[in-house]
Every structure is written in structure tokens, then in C-alpha cells.
Image (tube, grey):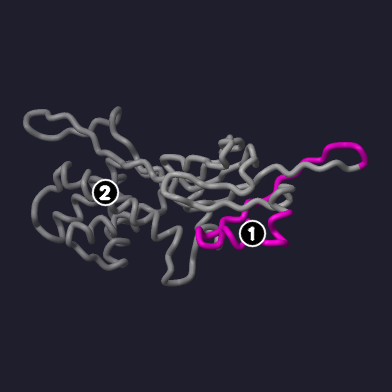
Amino acid sequence: MIDIDKLYTYIGKTIANKAQTGNLTPSDFNSLLPRAYQQWVYKTYDDMTDGRGWQSHQGITDDLRFLLVRNKVMQVALDGSLAVPSDYLHLSSINYTYSKLVKGKTVSRLKPVDIVRDNERSAFTDSDIYAPLLDAKKYVIAAFFDTYLQFYPSDVARVEFTYLRKPIDPVWSFTVVNGRPVYDPLTSINLEAPEESADEIAMIALSLFGINIRDQELISYSEAQKAQNL
């Protein structure tokens, strides 16, 4: 987790030193930091410039696992629809329970739900090969629509839905004392991201503020701040 007050001081001093524009206002900071934070999340889980994607390697999994939500049981409606969670960002997996009789006993196991595009649905539901599998729930597909998922067959009942949620917007809260903003840790919201991502998020925030800084400059400044315990 990243301490938002340290990041506020860190970015504010960088702006003051680089642009000589004075102090960073809380309003500016609270406006640009959530945007920078979201950009870091999007860039981390799906950076197409080098072919990365969610869980394509352990580094990405480690960086973003704080956003991973595992709903062990979600009830699918009788019509086969399931509302997408309001904080949904990116799918990790959907599984359903397949049960069958083996030597007179019911054996159940998790099987993956295959996500298909809207224009692919009929290729499965009207297929001589896939339709019987869907009817027997040996195979389950789902398609995303604006606010919900549609499952085939519709009587899938329950699923296990694991996804990346949207990050919670950080907030540097303050009270005004003698005309100056004073940090309020009780109502502030820290960044949930791992601490080692602070420099990269700071660079994105600075670029949104109109300041481009080289990696080495930021590293040097970061080390100086750490030496001062900031």
C-alpha cells in the first residue's frame, strides 16, 4: 500500500523543483492522482506494446492481485442472466459446477465457462455438436452485454466468478488551519497498489501535470526523499 501523504509530498516537491510553480494544491492532486492510478492499472494488466496481459507472467499477477475478487457463488437468474458487478474491470475466470452419476454416486467438479462473442452464440446453440453438450451442461458458454452476462444453457444455476475490480480512487483529505491545508489521515484514502509502484504512478501523475521527467531523475529524487524519510 502506498501512503498518499508521502506521495503528495513527493509529487509536490518534484513539481516545485522542476517547474518552479509553487506548491501543488490539494485540488490538483486529487484530480490528477486517480487518473494516474487508473492509467497505471490499465497499463499493468494490458500493456499491448509488449504483449503482456493479465496473468501472462507472475510479475503482473503480483502487481495486481490486490484487485482480484473471487465470488465463490453467484446465482444466475432463471433466464440465464447474471448482473456484472458494479466494480468489475476485467475477467479472470468463470467456473460452473458439473455433476454426473458415477457408480450410483453424484460426482461434482468445477469446469470453466467459455466466453464467446455475441455474434458467435448461434454457432454454439444451433450446432449439432455443441447444442447437446449445452443441454446436458457438459459445456457452458456466456456472452457479455452492457450490464450483464448471458449464459447458455440458462439453467446453469450458480457460477464462481473471479475478476479484477476497479481500483478505489485515492483521496488526500485535509483540514484548513491558518489558511493552509493540513493532511487528515483519518479521512484520506491510500493507494492500494504495492509500494514499489509508487515511482511509476508518480511519473504518470507528473506527465498529466505537464512535467516529463526521466527515469533516472525520478530515481535520484526518490532516493533523496527516502533518505529524508518522506
Residue ID at (36%, 43%): 191
Horizontal side of 41 relative to 139 (left or right) equals left
Which quadrant of the figure has residue 120?
bottom right
* Secondary element at image label 2: helix
Of circles 2 and 1, the one toward us is 1
Q: Residue at x 65, y 42 (%)?
A: 156
Q: Is residue 135 left or right of residue 2?
A: right
Q: Position of residue 20 (x, y in %)?
A: 9, 57
Q: Is the residue under label 1 in contact with that under label 2 (CB below 8 Å)?
A: no
State the quadrant of the N terminus. Answer: top left
The numbered mark at residue 33 is 2
Residue reaching furthest right?
Answer: 103
* Magenta stretch in the rendered image: 103-132
Residue drawn at point x = 53 percent, y = 42 percent? 81
Q: Amino acid at mark 1?
A: Asp
Tell whether position 110 is magenta: yes
Residue 166, which numbered label? none
